[in-house]
Amino acid sequence: MGDPIVPDTHEKSKIVLIGGFLGAGKTTLLKEILSSGSDMSDTVVIVNEFGDVGIDGSMLQGEKSDVIELTNGCICCTLLVDLTVMLKKIAEDFHPRYIVIEASGVADPRSIIGAVKQDHVKAYVELYKTVTVMDADCWMVRELLGELFSLQLQTADLILLNKMDLLDKGDVGRCLDWLHEMVPHAQVVPTLHCRIDPETIWNEPAREDHPEDRGSGDLKEIYEAYDSGHHGHGSDSGEGHHVKAVESGYKAFSFQDDGTVDEEAFKRFIQELRWEMFRVKGTVRFKDRTMLFNLVGGKSDWTPWNGSPETRLAFVGWDVDGDETIKKLKECVAS
């Protein structure tokens, strides 16, 4: 039997799979996504909990999206058939742009990815992005966590290194080095309470078979995503864990200049940035054109820019020297 035929009037629903070990912050990330300013009216959320009582789904009720719970089993094994039936029905009946799946902490992402690619499902949905939330504390005991922990990282397009304040300052760089070496294709973004620029979730994955990753929007979003206040969603690890981003080492700064930037010098400047500089975004004015530049978690892309011909960049990093960074960037500007 051939693949099912889907009317051409509807595009496939895009699957965003959120995985990670128990307690890493997956539900916190979902709340962050759903409570952002993004239009979530065309998004359906599926929450899977291993036990028979749903908790995460109730926590997400009232947000700007439909939430469906799958309980009493794991969607990578006992509930796999239920998941494929549900995905097909959701796509047929509602045609959402996105279907976000929060897998249980014990789920093998390979099984879920395989289910999405089955013939009777793939005509309706497509895997768009795999996001893994990693508890920074897990890095200290990574050798004890087994194959599942490794698989959850290896299958990720985007890794959120969450609860950064649990690591000693000297360990942050070593952890980022380890992640980029272990999963070189993935974007890696450090977070507190899974606070992240929403477009990082919805952007096209920065992998070789998806080269069209695009960055857009107001530069102010970066600062809003990493502000120093607590936003009332609750901490990932309990009462008393509310730590301001500035106090934990997060730094945001910017650079603006209307001069011409030497392209080769700027590219060297970007290559020499530390992993801790996990976000750079804005416009860069070269001799013959101005480009929109977007760097997220070690992966970058360029987009033609038809607006004001100036260099205007915003930086977000962890324990980075803003003054030294700006000094080196100024050396790229032609005199």
Image (spheres, helix red, strand yellow):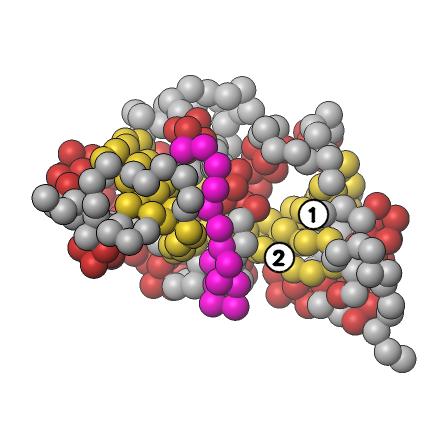
Q: Mark number for residue 142? A: none
Query: Given the image, on which type of amino acid does mark 1 rest?
Result: Tyr
Is 331 one of the magenta-colored residues?
no
Q: Position of residue 256 (x, y in %)?
A: 25, 33
- Give the residue at mark 2: 128
**Residue contact between numbered discs 1 and 2, judged by CB atoms under 8 Å:** yes
> Looking at the picture, how far across and down is residue 251, in whole percent?
29, 32
Residue drawn at x 34%, y 63% as measured from the top left: 181
1 or 2: tag closer to the N-terminus: 1
Q: Decide which of 153, 7 is in the foreground and name it.
A: 7
* Residue 214 among magenta residues: yes
Where is the N terminus found, in terms of image quarters?
bottom right
- Residue 119 image position (x, y, % from top left): 79, 71
**Magenta span main SS:** loop
* Image height of 137 relative to 121, above or below: above
- For residue 87, which quarter of the picture? bottom right
**Where the C terminus falls, by quadrant?**
top left
Location of mark 1 (residue): 98
Q: Which residues are magenta?
A: 206-219
The amino acid type, in three-letter code, at marker 2 is Tyr
- Image location (x, y in percent) of residue 164: 37, 38
Q: Is residue 284 visible?
A: yes
In this rendering, position of residue 52 left or right of residue 153: right
Q: Is residue 272 visible?
A: no
- Mark 2 neighbour density, 10 Å: few (under 14) some (14–19) many (20 or more): some
Residue beneath the point at 49% across and 50% down = 214
Q: How many marks?
A: 2
| Side of 307 relative to 99 (left or right) | left
